[in-house]
Image (spheres, grey):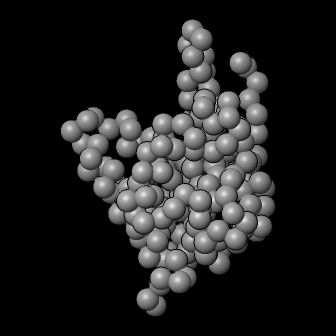
């Protein structure tokens, strides 16, 4: 399969939380839905541990097409270029305007830089809520980064992802203490 399809976000129109990933993967491109492959399964588990149900979340990506290179008959993920992120930005802005989530969570560097600028560093700033364009925004790592960790560090990386998702849950307007 050479051509890819446009994979839009998915979730309830009035979701309190919008999670923004990088781009659909092989599985997402085949199924036409975001985060339905291995990274999505890990995300679902992390959401569950953070007390968030996937069906209350609008899940989308900074880039709406799978970018890949072929190796034999396999399609291997290729990081999107800044131009792909720019080209897809109107879609993301449209999703933000339609869903109007109280909280936006970015998953990984591509999404964080797309919204906060190229100097943003996840390692230094993840898990810290900030005001952004009328939303509360919390950046965290990408679930794929957890999957890529050596097995002896994967548990720790997963727990850090859950902790950041729990920070997002704490920003839910109904749960916020401020
Ligand atoms: N990785 C992403 O960033 N988005 C998806 O939808 C799947 C994998």
Left or right for 59, reference 165? right
Q: Which one is in front, 154 or 88?
A: 154
Residue at point 42%, 51% (across, down): 45
Instruction: Pick out the residue farthest to the top.
Output: 72
- Tell me: residue 175, above or below residue 40: below
Percent x, y for residue 163? 35, 63
Percent x, y for residue 138? 49, 67
Residue 82 picture quarter: top right
Residue at point 72%, 56% (across, down): 92
Q: Looking at the figure, which quarter contains the N terminus? A: top right
Q: Which one is in front, 30 or 60?
A: 30
Instruction: Pick out the residue farthest to the bottom.
Output: 178
- Tell me: residue 173, above or below residue 156: below
Residue 29 picture quarter: top right
- Tell me: residue 45, above or below residue 132: above
Left or right for 66, reference 108? right
Residue at point 71%, 38% (across, down): 32
Percent x, y for residue 47? 45, 58
């Amino acid at each position: 399969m050479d051509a890819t399809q446009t994979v839009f976000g998915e979730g309830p129109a009035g979701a309190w939380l919008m999670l923004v990933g990088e781009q659909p993967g092989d599985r997402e491109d085949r199924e036409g839905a975001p985060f339905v492959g291995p990274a999505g399964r890990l995300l679902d588990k992390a959401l569950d541990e953070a007390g968030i149900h996937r069906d209350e979340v609008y899940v989308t990506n900074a880039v709406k097409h799978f970018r890949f290179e072929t190796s034999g008959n396999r399609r291997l993920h290729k990081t999107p270029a800044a131009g792909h992120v720019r080209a897809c930005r109107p879609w993301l802005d449209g999703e933000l305007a339609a869903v109007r989530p109280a909280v936006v969570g970015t998953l990984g560097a591509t999404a964080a830089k797309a919204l906060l600028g190229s100097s943003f560093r996840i390692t230094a700033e993840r898990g810290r809520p900030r005001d952004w364009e009328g939303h509360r925004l919390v950046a965290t790592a990408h679930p794929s980064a957890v999957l890529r960790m050596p097995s002896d560090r994967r548990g720790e990386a997963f727990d850090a992802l859950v902790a950041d998702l729990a920070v997002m849950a704490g920003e839910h307007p109904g749960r916020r203490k401020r």
